[in-house]
Amino acid sequence: MWVLIALAVSFAAAWFGFMEARGFVRRKLRFVDAVQSPLAPVAAGIGAALVAGVVVALIPIIGIGTALSFGISVGMGVAAGARDVRNGYYIAD
């Protein structure tokens, strides 16, 4: 039972991280040239994993794998958002 709850929390965190990072890059960072750098997704993913690692240390149900999957999903979201901006897809305000 606890394993399924932890898996659901991990999946939800990864999905949320990807969607929010992609949307943020598409909405707010579309005119920032630094987000087009190959290091931007890596930096965002490492930063998100470090912040999530602190949060995960306080919650006993989920582990470090959740923080790592969150960091990877944020990095992938930044990369997807940057690709969307390069292709001309953005969210109009």
Image (cartoon, rainbow, N blue to C red):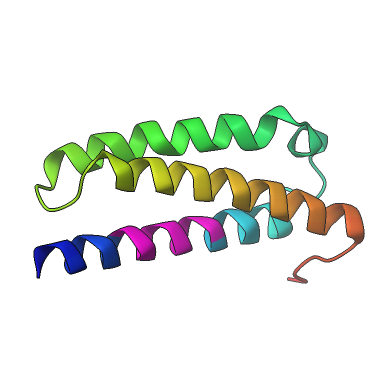
How many numbered discs, if any?
Answer: 0
Q: Residue at x 83, y 36 (%)?
A: 33
Please tell me whether residue 70 is drawn above or below residue 50 in the rendered image. Answer: below
Residue 88, percent from left and from top: 90, 62
Please tell me whether residue 85 is drawn above or below residue 93 in the rendered image. Answer: above
Q: Residue at x 68, y 52 (%)?
A: 25
Residue 70, percent from left and from top: 42, 48
On whether residue 69 falls in the magenta region, the answer is no
- Quarter of the image for the N terminus: give it: bottom left
Q: Residue furthest right?
A: 87
Q: Which residues make up the magenta segment? A: 10-18
What kind of secondary structure does the magenta stretch mostly adopt?
A: helix
Q: Nearer the viewer, residue 64 or 47?
A: 64
Q: Nearer the viewer, residue 3 or 41?
A: 3
Determine which quarter of the picture holds residue 92. Answer: bottom right
Q: Residue at x 13, y 47 (%)?
A: 59
Residue 67, percent from left and from top: 34, 42
Q: Residue at x 41, y 47 (%)?
A: 69
Residue 73, percent from left and from top: 51, 50
90 lies left or right of 79:
right
